[in-house]
Amino acid sequence: MGGSGSPVVLLHGFPQTQPMWRHEAADHTVICPDLRGYGASAKPADSDPETYSKRTTAGDVVRLAQMIQASTEPSSYTSSTPGPRRRTRSPPTSAATTSPRPRRPCQNAWAGDLRHRTAPCGHSMAEEDPELIADEIRSLADR
């Protein structure tokens, strides 16, 4: 958790970890955990498929938000993977996701620096110019 301003929960996707959101911390109170099994998070050895399911991962994030809620309630939740279609908790103020299979309008919204240099895995964050990428993401979110 770091930064200042309105709180936002940022979730990474495959194959990233929470440092992918480090540039967004300048404008928000950023809560960006490593998801179960990634980075510095716990890596349960349980072979039950539910151990790493999206439902279990969502539960981890809900519990984290509940622990933090004593001091502040996140106003936005963002993920770089598609989220569940159905929520069982009260909805956040806003939510956004990016898809592992971005559509042409989404691809056109990325920084010009990335045009014609992305692989089919367009969901991965490019590091050539992280400040430009952060600016473009903020611009896209403001639309």
Image (spheres, rainbow, N blue to C red):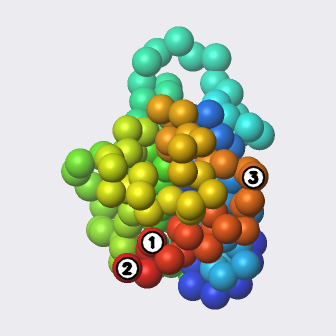
Relative to 4, say whether 128 is above or below. Answer: above
Residue drawn 65% across the image and 77% down it: 29
The residue beneath circle 2 is: 143
Front of the two marks 1 and 3: 3
Q: CA distance from mark 1 to mark 2?
A: 5 Å
Pick whichever, 21 or 61, lies toward us: 21
**Relative vertical location of residue 67 with respect to residue 27 in this rendering, above or below:** above
Which residue is labeled 3 in the image?
128
**Viewer-nearest of discs 3 and 2:** 3
Amino acid type indicated by mark 3: Glu
Q: Badge 3: how crowded within 10 Å, few (<14), some, or many (20+)?
A: few
Q: Position of residue 122 (x, y in %)?
A: 50, 41
Give percent across and percent down for residue 69. 54, 74
Secondary element under disc 2, as helix, strand or loop, is loop
Q: Amino acid at mark 2?
A: Arg
Residue that mark 1 sits on = 140
Q: Is residue 46 above or below residue 26?
A: above
Residue 98 in view of the camera: yes
Q: For this rendering, which residue is in front, 78 or 64?
A: 78
- Distance from the alpha carbon under mark 3 to that under mark 2: 24 Å
Mark 3 and mark 2 residues within 8 Å of each other at the beta carbon: no
Quick check: 85 left or right of 141? left
- Mark 1 closeness class: few <14, some 14–19, many ≥20 residues within 10 Å: few
Give the quadrant of the N terminus: bottom right
The answer to whether mark 1 and mark 2 are in CB contact below 8 A is: yes
Q: Position of residue 34 (x, y in %)?
A: 66, 46
Quarter of the picture containing the C terminus is bottom left
Residue 32 visible? The answer is no
